[in-house]
Amino acid sequence: MAERSPWFYLTTPIYYVNDVPHIGHAYTTIAADVLARTHRQMEEPVFFLTGTDEHGQKVWQSAEKHSLSPQLYVDRILPRFRDLWVRLGISNDDFVRTTQPRHVKGVSEVLARLREKGDLYEGAYEGWYCLPDERFWTDKDVVDGLCPECRRPVERISETNIFFRMSRYQEWLISWYESHPESIRPESRYNEIMGFLRKPLADLCISRPKSRVPWGIPIPFAPDYVTYVWFDALLNYVTVPWSLGATPGEGLDRLWPAVHIIGKDILTTHAVYWPIILAALDLPPPRLIFAHGWWTVDGEKMSKSRGNVVDPGALLDLFGTDPLRFYLLREGQFGHDVDFSLIGLINRINRDLANDLGNLLSRVAAMADRYFPGEGVSRPETPGSPELREAANTLLPEALARTQALEFHRALQTLWEFVAELNRTVDLRAPWVLAKDPERRGELSAVLYDLLEGLRLTALYLAPFLPETSGKILEALGVPAGISILSYREHGVFGLEKIYRVQETGSLFIKRDTLGNPLGEEGEGSRKKTRSDKTATATPEPAASGKERPSETEQEKPNKASEVSAPAPLIDYADFQKVRLATGIVREAEPVPKSKKLLKLSVDVGEPVPRTVVAGIAGSYRPEDLVGKTVVVVTNLAPATLMGVTSQGMLLAATTQDGVALLTVDGPAAPGNGIK
RNA sequence: GGCGAUGUAGCUCAGUCGGCAGAGCAGGUGAAUCAUAAUCACUCGGUCGGGGGUUCGAAUCCCUCCAUCGCCA
């Protein structure tokens, strides 16, 4: 392979502004962000680009509908994406909009150049056109006069257009991929493209008549036409670098080729059309095209018509940046489809984040604070735990390698093996036992030092994934986090010469009940509204929680009423109908063993067998008071196991100042009456 | 219809060169009390989709059938 640029040039697709950002957009962008941050910590120069695709017929139509000029319309839509990226902690270096002059200029130049080379020609085009999808179909595709994709009527269009001679480059592309099989991943996607390329490529129609699609980049030598949106959009990957250099071409020479992170739905455009466009411009193909999978929701494809589109903004409101980043990258394999479920997200937050990691910091910090309040914990002569150091030396580099290979879930899994090793070390070395023996004070200090070092390294390697959390851990350890980038080379070694003066800390993560509501008594400042800036590691945050220890009494009422306020998106009646509600009569009720909050109920909802429902209402109701009560039950909620009991439904209850108050009906009702 | 992939524990998946079936979660038992009731150890659990073949030996290689998914048409 030719020597390549030292730069790590990384892109996401540019997102079509006519859509509302959904979890898939967030997924792509977060993955790219993790990769960008990782390479920065590897001290590579990184250029991370994302942006928006703002031309095309649909945008123009939407603008019309809102009686706005297209430009004004896209200007108004833009913040949906831009703000979301800020909230997700995305560290992009630039943000391209296809309406920016730099991009428009670049596209015009490309068109002129391709024309000079003879790669463009005018031709007649006749076919069926689907207006909403902005694409042509052949006679064979169309079924009963309907678009095969969206099932809406197509119209017959006959027009002259400008075509790009893709077919010219087909053989070249095949041989390039044969010698670079690693440039499309996962491997199954590579096979797919090779299969696609076995058939002859049709030339690409790259123009649209202005009379039909007035909103696009004008074609310089054909005044009645604008550029086809896909052609326009792909070019952002080069028009932006072009605009950056001091001389034309300099920025691109420095950055190219790029690593493209995309969803599997746009593989063909990126792996076939795009390299051919590049070849026509005498540029090498991308370094890597990685097509990730889709998020399904409870096993179903996410789509507007199904009404199951997951809104990342709402999840952010509820759970915050880092838990969402973690869940999306930990839950499935990057490259495979993954199923989204709220229970899954909550489980990740509670187990991996709060229990394994959050509690680890909490217990280690508490001991360091208690046993070495003034003097601190300093680097020992002999390692406190050789096993722990060994684990750090093997697991952490392995995690880094996996991140570089875009195996994010494996990377996080490996990091959590290290977290488990830290927890194990705490248990095995039992510092609270050492603390009772003054003669073993040196040993105690050495063990704590190794644990603190382990936590510091965890934060370092976790930083690309969980930038806010990483910053909080480092801050708790008293490591100045002011430097925005901590390099692995400089900070990645075990055994920093340092005296740790650590104070007991508040919670890193708040646990959630099955509805996502915060659990526990951490009502105060520990859960601020997450409004992080791009460099989350640098946000200083007064460690106020260290002073006020939560009282040991377990009787405090969870103060949750204030926490539920996410600005709710509007839903259709169809959405509402998806929730099946019915009246139920409580037949039996008993506490769930070992649980303070849960009651196990047997509820008659008019079915042959009463449902077992686990409800978090023990704080407000005694079991014996519930029997015979009429309640409102969600009957089509996916079952969930709480404290070992499988719940087959959910009771509706108001969240009040004092706890919860169950909903009931105003009048006689039989078990299983419908509710709407 | 063509091409490609997948099928392994209740769930999500790993399994290199053919060499005694693995992890996490869930379930069970115990330990511990530093910690956010958080942790740690042990443990239950599998006809490796079905059938056939090659081999001393198959989750792994070959054939075939079934199921699911993807791409193309």
Image: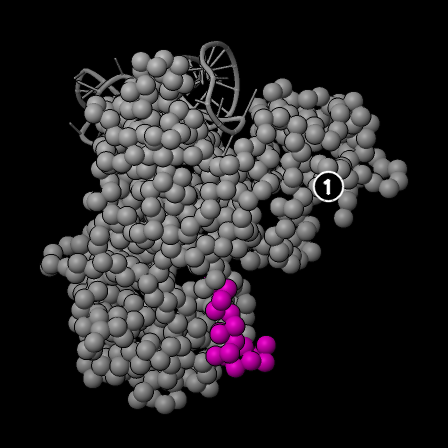
Q: Horizontal and vertical percent for residue A293?
A: 39, 49
Which secondary structure is most common in the magenta stretch? helix
Q: Horizontal and vertical percent for residue B2?
A: 32, 51
10 Å crowding of disc 1: few (<14), some (14-19), many (20+) = few
Tell me the SS state at disc 1. strand
Q: Which corner quadrant of the image does residue A392 belong to?
A: top left
In the image, is residue A34 part of the stretch drawn in magenta?
no
Location of residue A160 with respect to A243 vertically, above or below:
below
Left or right: residue A186 compared with residue A18? left
Write the residue at 21% across / 64% down. Answer: A256
- Residue A125 can be seen in this image: no
Q: Which chain carries label 1?
A: A
In the image, is residue A65 part of the stretch drawn in magenta?
yes
Q: On the image, numbered disc 1 is attached to which residue? A: A656
**Where are the magenta residues, as a range?**
A63-81
Write the residue at 39% across / 43% down. Answer: A475
Residue most extreme to the left: A2
